Amino acid sequence: MAADGETIGLALVSVRASLLDSGAVSDGEEARAESEILLAHVLSINSGGLITSMTQPLPPEAAERLAGLLKRRLQREPLRYITGSCPFYGRDFAVDRRVLIPRQETELVVERALRWAGRHGAVRIADIGTGSGVLAITLALELDGAEVHAVDISPDALDVAAQNARRLGVAANIGFHEGDLADPLWGPFDIVVANLPYVLAGRMGEVEPELAPEVLAEPRLALDGGPDGLDLIGRFVPQLPGLLSDEAIALLEIDPPLVDGVRALVEEHMPAADMQIIDDLAGMARVAEITIGD
Ligand SMILES: C[S@@+](CC[C@H](N)C(=O)[O-])C[C@H]1O[C@@H](n2cnc3c(N)ncnc32)[C@H](O)[C@@H]1O
């Protein structure tokens, strides 16, 4: 690793090579991105600052910290737990092992909610399975005056979410509730978002290598959707009619194998609703968008 007097630019090259050689990342682009995040983190600078510091020497204390963090990463600890933060919709959220690391594709839920709110307005919003709070907090920040309620069954996750809400200045707009699905809430809501655990229990490692049982670092409670992926969503869809107002939208994050099951649930429990499947940037079915009214 970093030799004495090494420049920041050379340290970057060396971290990138270690990440690739160890197989901790699968391609050069990922290795470049992760090495920049690690270097910027130990130097407490942003990516712009990193670019202008390439020829400067890496301070010895930063080199020592970098070596420790790289060791953890080479032992397959997820990068976002190592740095303790994760970007989502242009803001940084604190994350640790108590919560799922927010995925970029979940931003699609925010985009669809804001699109609907732009046409209809939104007064009351519910986020079920809030985790680090990314959906509840982002919607509270993007939609002035909205009253947001966020639920999680994990008190640990709610601690992280409440801390994020305080740090991002929206604690007063969000009620955090511990409980099962929508049980702690009372409707009606205009927008309901839910990224509930949906990974098929037997296929966690196929979906992402980091989710294989032998290396899983994220809470299983946040991911495991049972044998068909529908344990949670299957219990939640029947709650939606009692939760939504006459003109409302529910946005459920899903995975392609769940499309038929979710469609059947909506047809059974919400026959008057319209449902569309929205693909993510990778062309995968990612969000079930269920609307009531116009
Ligand atoms: C996939 S994570 C989503 C976290 C966050 N909303 C995001 O998009 O990054 C699912 C969350 O649902 C929570 N959860 C699991 N079972 C639940 C239940 N029965 N009721 C409420 N929340 C639940 C987990 O604790 C976890 O925080």
Image (cartoon, helix red, strand yellow):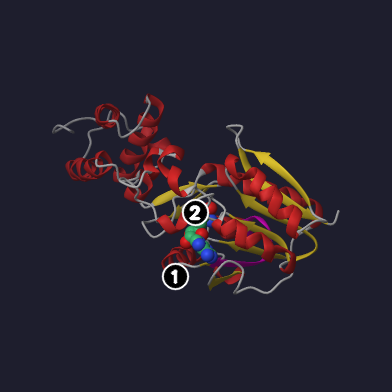
Secondary structure state at the residue bearing disc 2: loop
Q: CA distance from mark 2 to mark 1?
A: 21 Å
Q: Residue at x 61, y 58 (%)?
A: 234
From this view, report whether residue 242 is shown above or below residue 133.
below
User: In the rendered image, which quarter is residue 282 located in?
Assistant: top right
Q: What span is in magenta? A: 139-151
In depth, the one of 169 and 212 nearer the eye is 212
Dot 2: few (<14), some (14–19), or many (≥20) neighbours within 10 Å?
A: some
In depth, the one of 268 and 88 nearer the eye is 268
Residue 164 visible within the image: no
Which is closer to the viewer, label 2 or label 1? 2
Q: Position of residue 243 (x, y in %)?
A: 71, 67
Dot 1: few (<14), some (14–19), or many (≥20) neighbours within 10 Å?
A: some
Q: Is residue 140 magenta?
A: yes
Q: Position of residue 204 (x, y in %)?
A: 43, 44
- The residue at the far right in this view is 294
State which quarter of the image contains the N terminus.
Answer: top left
What's the amino acid at mark 1? Pro
Judging by the rendered image, the residue that carries numbered circle 2 is: 226
Q: Residue at x 60, y 73 (%)?
A: 183
What's the amino acid at mark 2? Gly
Cβ atoms at labels 2 and 1 below 8 Å apart: no
First in residue order: circle 2 vs circle 1: 1
Left or right: residue 32 compared with residue 108: left
Q: Position of residue 279 (x, y in %)?
A: 65, 37
From this view, report whether residue 198 is shown above or below residue 283.
below
From this view, report whether residue 163 is shown above or below residue 197.
below
Judging by the rendered image, the residue that carries numbered circle 1 is: 155
Q: Which mark is residue 11?
A: none
Secondary structure state at the residue bearing disc 1: helix
Q: Position of residue 272 (x, y in %)?
A: 83, 56
